[in-house]
Image (cartoon, helix red, strand yellow):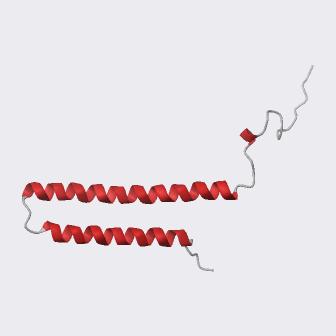
Amino acid sequence: MALRAPPCWKSIADRCVGRIVEIHTLWTTEWSCKSHVNKIILVVVFVVRIVWLLLGVLYQWCLRVMRHRILYSNESSPHDKPLGEGYPVIPAKY
């Protein structure tokens, strides 16, 4: 049985590929005939956009994980129960 990525990963991958193509196109068209200072600014903008893209992907992934945990959690946490419920009772020694 082959492992397949969930459909949500396809949309994230499509957005990433589209953004990388957009950044690459901007990079190749803007790089020619630029001064040294402008090239440094362009590199900084390029790095910031890549970091922003990665942060966006990480944020979307975290949202999906949290949504999955909330929707599909069948067990309640011991912290949700009042003290004494759900724990084994240990008899006191007098």
Residue positioned 27% across, 57% down in the render: 47
Q: Is residue 79 left or right of residue 6?
A: right
Q: Is residue 47 left or right of residue 2?
A: left
Residue 75, image x and y in percent? Answer: 75, 51
Q: Residue furthest right?
A: 94
Residue 57, image x and y in percent? Answer: 44, 60
Q: Say which quadrant the C terminus sits in.
A: top right
Can you say whether 20 is above or below 92 in the image? below
Could you say which is closer to the camera, residue 94 or residue 30? 30
Q: Residue furthest bottom?
A: 1
Residue positioned 64% across, 55% down in the render: 69
Picture quadrant where residue 82 is located: top right
Q: Is residue 12 left or right of residue 42?
A: right
Picture quadrant where residue 33 is located: bottom left
Q: How many marks?
A: 0
Could you say which is closer to the camera, residue 14 or residue 5? 14
Residue 42, image x and y in percent? Answer: 18, 59
Residue 77, image x and y in percent? Answer: 72, 45
Residue positioned 49% across, 73% down in the render: 10
Residue positioned 30% across, 58% down in the render: 49
Q: Is residue 14 left or right of residue 63?
A: left
Q: Say which quadrant the N terminus sits in.
A: bottom right
